[in-house]
């Protein structure tokens, strides 16, 4: 009976360890994370975003392939497509210019997209300058 309890405890510990490794390892990460964003305004309600993404799982076969700027109710305002992996450049920063944002929008959310799983991961919410 004691041997079965020990075996059960060892199995549970192994399962927990495997699930923790999977959740925390780059291979288990499903989405890129937005880790930094800077924004500046220009004329005519246009904004430029500098977005830093972390996607340590990036390979030529699967990578972070875009990020988007959206309103708090998730209406997309602009998308930057990424055409190749950034496996040797983690984290990486890219810009998106000319995003027109209506005057009544004072806050936006930036979110990354994975080639296989779509949009998700850690987002950043920021207030727009001058609004």
Image: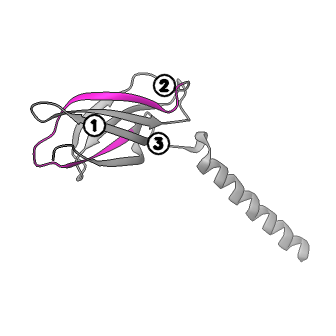
Residue at figure coordinates x 60%, y 48% from the top left = 24
Q: Looking at the picture, how far across and down is residue 83, in whole percent?
A: 40, 22
Tell me the mark number nearer the camera, choosing from 3 and 1: 1
Q: Secondary structure at mark 2?
A: loop
Q: CA distance from mark 1 to mark 2?
A: 24 Å
Q: CA distance from mark 3 to mark 1?
A: 23 Å
Left or right: residue 7 versus residue 44 is: right
Q: Nearer the viewer, residue 46 or 19?
A: 46
Left or right: residue 69 versus residue 85 is: left
**What label sits on residue 85 in the rendered view?**
2
Q: Earlier in the sequence, mark 3 or mark 1?
A: 3
Q: Residue furthest front?
A: 130
Q: Earlier in the sequence, mark 3 or mark 2?
A: 3
Tell me the mark number nearer the camera, choosing from 1 and 2: 1
**What label sits on residue 31 in the rendered view?**
3
Compared with 103, 92 (above or below) is above
Q: Looking at the picture, how far across and down is residue 131, in whole percent?
A: 15, 47
Left or right: residue 4 versus residue 47 is: right
Q: Secondary structure at mark 3?
A: loop
Q: Secondary structure at mark 1?
A: strand
Q: Nearer the viewer, residue 34 or 50?
A: 50
The residue pinned by badge 1 equals 39
Residue segment shown in magenta? 89-112
Q: Looking at the picture, how far across and down is residue 127, in whole percent?
A: 25, 48
């Amino acid at each position: 009976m004691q041997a079965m309890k020990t075996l059960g405890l060892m199995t549970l510990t192994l399962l927990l360890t495997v699930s923790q490794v999977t959740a925390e390892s780059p291979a288990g990460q499903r989405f890129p994370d937005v880790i930094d964003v800077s924004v500046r305004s220009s004329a005519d309600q246009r904004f430029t975003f500098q977005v830093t993404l972390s996607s340590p799982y990036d390979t030529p076969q699967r990578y972070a392939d875009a990020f988007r700027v959206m309103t708090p109710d998730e209406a997309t305002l602009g998308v930057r497509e990424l055409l190749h992996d950034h496996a040797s450049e983690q984290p990486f920063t890219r810009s998106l210019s000319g995003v027109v944002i209506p005057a009544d929008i004072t806050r936006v959310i930036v979110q990354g997209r994975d080639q296989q799983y779509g949009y998700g991961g850690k987002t950043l919410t920021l207030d727009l300058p001058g609004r």
